Amino acid sequence: MYKLIRFILFKFNTEAVHHFSMGSLSFVCRSRLIKKWVAKSFTYNHLQLEKQVFGLHFKNPVGLGAGFDKNALYLNELEALGFGFVEIGTVTPLPQAGNEKPRLFRLPKDKALINRMGFNNDGVEVIANRLKEWKNGSQLTVDGGLIIGGNIGKNKITPNEEAWKDYVTCFNALFDVVDYFVVNVSSPNTSGLRELQEKDALHKIFVNLQAINQQKPNPKPLLLKIAPDLTTGQLDDIVSLALEIRLDGLVATNTTISREGLATSPEEIKAIGMGGLSGKPVQQRSTDVVTYLSSKLQGKVPIIASGGIFTGADAKEKLDAGATLIQVWTGFVYEGPGIAKGICKELSKLKN
Ligand SMILES: Cc1cc2nc3c(=O)[nH]c(=O)nc-3n(C[C@H](O)[C@H](O)[C@H](O)COP(=O)(O)O)c2cc1C
């Protein structure tokens, strides 16, 4: 059934379809009855899937990656679709329009996407208020317990030397309304952002965030999201930094700037232009990064795996590589709204 819907949806502009699909789901879910039906049809609960990670209880290990619900608009709907956690953002201090459209492209031959969204978002104040409202009305959610990650970034106009202040602003504004934080320095669509993955720059950001966090009666888990394009030396730096500043977790990985091994023609790729590539082409590299990090970290720092996960077998590949939780994004576009349930079901079978 979803194949037919996908066939039709793929005839239209990618970003417009994203908003149309989520808007439609949100509209029908206004009815409690329909939302209950959606939740009944799309969620899969199993004791074996529950996980306790960095002090938080996840009802299942399948999350939705950052960038899908940047503005925290669809949390109830995403919960009804069976996700154990949703990472909102990337959120920046000031609202941003992002890059010029079109900025999101499908590569069906590769089961991939290329995006250069550029951190379009409503800004941290608006998003924090939206989350506050959502939390206060949480009796309206399906069965409660959806974990919310806050993925934070810097505004385009903020120079890298001042970037740490943007992270602090977002951290303070979202502290009471998210369950964990992810520092995003790995998106390829904000000029110079990925330079912040260097050890000194990261150190500055995290020392400042931890200083605030550790003053709180209940500090929040603090994670770092990294690119799949880092060298072994850079990964080693991340490992030592993670241990030194006691990171609670890593998200591996973001999209890649590589265009290697694609089935899509070089002419089409050239016509699309710059951006981060996601989906199947990033799967292997992302698994390799997870394998490398987990071998070095020896379970001391949990890893959320992201990159090319479409099925339960893909999720298991990441868990076997050492990840504790997984996130999907491009898989949602290709596999449809049943992706979380499908993965949960397969995982619970594969575990036995
Ligand atoms: C359109 C689009 C927008 C994204 N926006 C963000 C973002 O704002 N922040 C972020 O950390 N990652 C962002 N990502 C990266 C995803 O969260 C994910 O890490 C990446 O796409 C790899 O997973 P996938 O292969 O399952 O898509 C975005 C990805 C896509 C496709």
Image (spheres, rainbow, N blue to C red):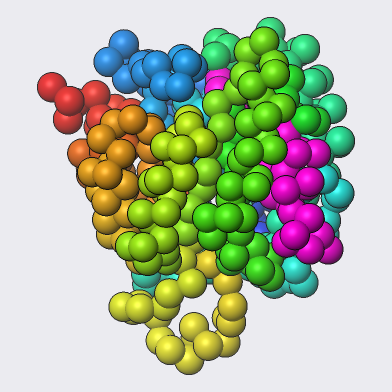
- Percent x, y of residue 2: 44, 47
* Residue appearing at x 40%, y 45% in the figure: 240
Compared with 349, 293 (above or below) is below
* Residue appearing at x 42%, y 54% in the figure: 237
The one of 293 and 2 positioned closer to us in this rendering: 293
Compared with 264, 10 (above or below) is above
Compared with 16, 31 (above or below) is above
Decide if residue 282 is in sight here.
Answer: no
**Quarter placement of the C terminus:** top left
**Quarter placement of the N terminus:** top left
User: Is 321 left, or right, of 237 in this rendering?
Assistant: left
- Percent x, y of residue 112: 43, 64
User: Is 190 left, or right, of 266 in this rendering?
Assistant: right
> Of all residues shown, which one is farthest toward the left?
352
Compared with 295, 115 (above or below) is below
Decide if residue 95 is in sight here.
Answer: yes
Magenta-colored stretch includes residue 168: yes
Magenta-colored stretch includes residue 203: no
* Residue appearing at x 46%, y 45% in the figure: 241
| Residue 260 picture quarter | bottom left
The one of 160 and 229 positioned closer to us in this rendering: 160
Marker count (numbered):
0
- Percent x, y of residue 328: 44, 44
The one of 218 and 243 positioned closer to us in this rendering: 243
Magenta residue span: 146-171
User: Is 248 left, or right, of 351 in this rendering?
Assistant: right
> Of all residues shown, which one is farthest toward the bottom?
267
- Percent x, y of residue 48: 27, 15
User: Is 159 left, or right, of 68 in this rendering?
Assistant: right
